[in-house]
């Protein structure tokens, strides 16, 4: 999937061009280190016509607009007329303050550009960073913005599926296709759970041998389950996997209880675990926004994410424990246990996953949710995943948060956040915040 990120350095020739050229060369060098495919002009765009010529024929997913020197608002206006995409406004730190001439005046140029952007798009219609090329903080901000812009582009190409209806009392995860398309650009497919159950029942054991072998290579203890449940799991896994492949599905939210226990006799939990391991983000209890949160997290890190309920808080240790019945990705399991298989903690039927998650020095807790008025919002908190054994039957993960854990729990309950969260291996709070701003959503970040 192609991305187009365009760097537009602007200025006027009456400023100190030797300094401007140094800043331009250093900026190009840093941007190419961030992403070698960023499109850069051969020289600074010193006129509005030069901006227009450089942008001709381009359809960027992100514009990095940089005031190499001061430039009036007409430059930004030309970009706004041509480009319907996020804008990163990069202000260069004034390189020399020595009582002589003003070399760049990039900051005043940023005010002019920002004023024009806000007139077109309203407040918050861009991301702003101030820093010289080569500054690590500046490079980090730009790297996060590039990552966020790529995720935004991917969302517009994402097709999700809701498999079955949300259980009674779990409406917080229910999504309308028009809302997903309008707010995120995501397409939503839907299918009844019974359709996949019937599809699974029609497979023979021979048709599912490869799927069963794949599972046995990733989990520990599957053969301890009753033979019927093992075979039914393989059928169900094949049904889900073929549905995903045949329909181009990038993330799913699946109904789980009671149907798969009562109508099929085998849970879907381990099926979702294996799909998560295959980088098909999969939530249970038909939580569409939970699955969407998982997808965003996996796009930013390239790895699996954990989905679960907040079930315990320890203010002394500063931790929150997240848990679910047994659908965590196999590759999140602790090395000393592996992806252990067990039975569902309530229904006592397997196979489900039954392990504690591996530790991680960097973690982000994330949720795409709604406020009491129905507006979408991002929950973001960072910390680390502790080296803890399985906390409860099922799958669990223990996060020590940077912000006091007891206050996170108190405030999120008080403000009506949903009971499902995603734990991402990696500190991606900055990129998530920038993505939220690009999507014009409310952001609640605990740091």
Image (cartoon, grey):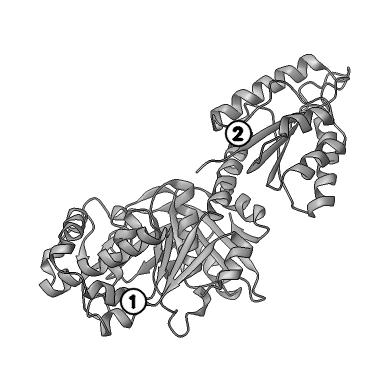
**What count of labels does the image hold?**
2
Q: Which residue carries the number 2 mark?
A: 139
Question: Which x, y percent locates residue 32?
Answer: 57, 27
Q: Residues within 10 Å of mark 1 (few under 14, many from 20)?
A: few
Q: Which residue lies furthest to the top in this view?
A: 18
Q: Residues within 10 Å of mark 2 (few under 14, many from 20)?
A: many
- Snapshot quadrant of residue 46: top right
Vertical side of 248 occupied by 162: above or below? below
Answer left or right for 162 relative to 217: right
Answer left or right for 203 relative to 426: left
Query: Quadrant of the image for the C terminus?
Result: bottom right
Q: Nearer the viewer, residue 354 or 259?
A: 259
Question: Which x, y percent locates residue 307?
Answer: 41, 64
* Dot 2: element: helix
Question: Which x, y percent locates residue 278?
Answer: 33, 54
> Which circle, 1 or 2, is nearer the viewer?
1
Residue 164 appears anywhere in the view: yes
The residue shown at (22%, 68%) is 235
**Which mark identifies residue 68?**
none
- Snapshot quadrant of residue 259: bottom left
The residue shown at (81%, 44%) is 114
Label 1, label 2: how far apart the Cα atoms are? 49 Å
Say whether disc 1 or disc 2 marks the residue closer to the N-terminus.
Answer: 2
Q: Nearer the viewer, residue 352 or 322?
A: 352
Answer left or right for 333 relative to 10: left
**Which mark identifies residue 195?**
1
Question: Which x, y percent locates residue 378?
Answer: 59, 61
Residue 315 appears anywhere in the view: no
* Dot 1: element: helix
Vertical side of 310 occupied by 42: above or below? above
């Amino acid at each position: 999937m192609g991305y187009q990120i365009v760097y537009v350095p602007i200025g006027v020739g009456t400023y100190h061009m030797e300094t401007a050229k140094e800043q331009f060369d250093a900026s190009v060098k840093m941007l190419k280190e961030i992403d070698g495919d960023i499109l850069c002009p051969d020289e600074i765009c010193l006129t509005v016509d030069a901006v227009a010529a450089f942008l001709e024929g381009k359809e960027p997913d992100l514009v990095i607009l940089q005031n190499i020197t001061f430039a009036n608002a007409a430059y930004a206006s030309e970009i706004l007329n041509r480009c319907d995409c996020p804008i990163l406004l990069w202000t260069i730190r004034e390189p020399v303050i020595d009582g002589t001439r003003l070399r760049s005046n990039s900051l005043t140029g940023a005010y002019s550009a920002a004023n024009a952007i806000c007139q077109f798009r309203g407040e918050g219609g861009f991301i702003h960073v101030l820093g010289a090329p080569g500054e690590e903080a500046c490079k980090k901000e730009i790297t996060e913005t590039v990552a966020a812009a790529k995720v935004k582009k991917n969302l517009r190409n994402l097709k999700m599926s809701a498999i079955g209806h949300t259980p009674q009392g779990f409406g917080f995860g229910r999504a309308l296709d028009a809302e997903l398309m309008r707010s995120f650009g995501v397409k939503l497919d839907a299918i009844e759970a019974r359709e996949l159950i019937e599809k699974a029942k029609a497979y023979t054991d021979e048709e599912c041998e490869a799927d069963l072998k794949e599972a046995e290579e990733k989990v520990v203890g599957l053969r301890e389950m009753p033979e019927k449940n093992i075979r039914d799991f393989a059928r169900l896994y094949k049904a889900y996997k073929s549905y995903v492949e045949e329909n181009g599905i990038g993330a799913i939210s699946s109904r789980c209880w009671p149907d798969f226990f009562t109508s099929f006799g085998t849970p879907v939990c381990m099926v979702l675990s294996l799909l998560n391991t295959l980088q098909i983000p999969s939530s249970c209890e038909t939580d569409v926004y939970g699955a969407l949160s998982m997808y965003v997290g996996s796009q930013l890190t390239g790895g699996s994410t954990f989905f679960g309920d907040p079930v315990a808080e320890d203010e002394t240790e500063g931790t929150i424990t997240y848990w679910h019945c047994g659908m965590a990705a196999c590759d999140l399991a602790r090395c000393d246990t592996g992806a252990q298989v067990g039975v569902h903690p309530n229904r006592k039927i397997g196979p489900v996953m039954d392990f504690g998650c591996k530790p991680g020095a960097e973690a982000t807790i994330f949720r795409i949710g709604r406020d009491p008025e129905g507006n979408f919002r991002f929950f973001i908190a960072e910390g680390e995943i502790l080296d803890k054994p399985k906390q409860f039957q099922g799958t669990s993960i223990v996060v020590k948060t940077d912000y006091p854990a007891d206050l996170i729990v108190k405030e999120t309950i008080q403000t009506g956040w949903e009971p499902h969260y995603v734990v991402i291996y990696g500190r991606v709070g900055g990129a998530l915040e920038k993505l939220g701003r690009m999507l014009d959503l409310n952001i609640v970040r605990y740091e």
